[in-house]
Image (tube, grey):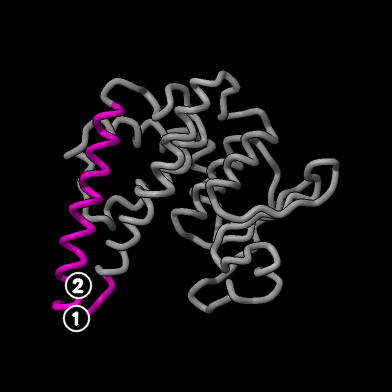
Amino acid sequence: MTIQLHTFDTPNGRKISVALEEMGLPYTVHTVNITKDEQFKPDFLRLSPNNKIPAILDTEGPGAKPVSVFESGAILIYLAEKTGKFLPTEPRARVAVFEWLMFQMAGFGPMPGQVHHFLGLSNEDDKRYGLARYMKETRRLYGVMDQRLASHTFFAGEISIADFAILGWAWRHQRHQVDLNDFPNVKRWYDTMMARPAVQRGFAVALK
């Protein structure tokens, strides 16, 4: 059994490569070069109808039949349930994982993503308002994370798919123009995560 990972070298793509390494699942990378609009090709759209990476194809899905999954959060939940790893079964602990996973999906991804967009603009008038708005919100989200991690080693207690999801975006903190020294609890967590051998393998695998 090998999972096909269709992705590119982005925060959302790295979430899944890290998770696959942490879970010990065999996988192959199928690069979808979003700089060349390969995400719009019919073969990829059959896996991800919203033309967004990443997507996976598990040739041995439920009932031993192939299944494809798109949206990085859905992929993380699927992989966690498939392996029984990084998603607790105890209801309260499970709720915490889902809370912080959705925090990432709804906030700590879209907001820094807007920072990426406005930083790439050449017209200073175009970028000024957007950067002021989205960098302020991005720093607020780092503050929320820092407060949480002041009393928790990981976001949901034990390490979970929520940590993998958030790590994919924290990995780009320099691009967000955020100094992790301003958020010492996030920095402690980030250094702990990046020191894990499977995380290092997940970031080292070629995705483009």
Res 175 → quadrant: bottom left
* Left or right, residue 50 beside residue 187: right
Tell how many labels.
Answer: 2
Q: CA distance from mark 1 to mark 2?
A: 6 Å
Give the residue displayed 40% in from the left and 49% down from the top. Answer: 106
Percent position of residue 103, x then y = 39, 42
Q: Which residue is mark 2?
A: 127
Range shown magenta = 120-149
Give the residue displayed 40% in from the left and 45% down from the top. Answer: 104
Res 33 → quadrant: bottom right
Which amino acid type is marked by label 1? Answer: Asn
Crowding at dot 2, Cα within 10 Å, few <14 / some 14-19 / many 20+, comes out as some
* Left or right, residue 56 beside residue 205: right
Percent position of residue 15, x then y = 50, 47
Secondary structure state at the residue bearing disc 2: helix
Percent position of residue 38, x then y = 59, 75
Q: Is residue 126 magenta?
A: yes
Which amino acid type is marked by label 2? Answer: Lys
Q: Is residue 74 magenta?
A: no
Please identify the dominant SS of the magenta region.
helix
Q: Is residue 9 above or below residue 189?
A: below
Secondary structure state at the residue bearing disc 1: loop
Q: Which residue is mark 1?
A: 123
Tell me the number on the disc at residue 132: none
Percent position of residue 46, x then y = 70, 67
Work out which quarter of the rendered image holds the N terminus and state it. Answer: top right
Give the residue displayed 21% in from the left and 56% down from the top. Answer: 135
Q: Is residue 86 above or below residue 9?
A: above
Q: Is residue 9 above or below residue 63?
A: below
Q: Are marks 1 and 2 in contact (CB under 8 Å)?
A: yes
Q: Nearer the viewer, residue 1 or 64?
A: 64
Q: Is residue 194 above or below residue 68?
A: above
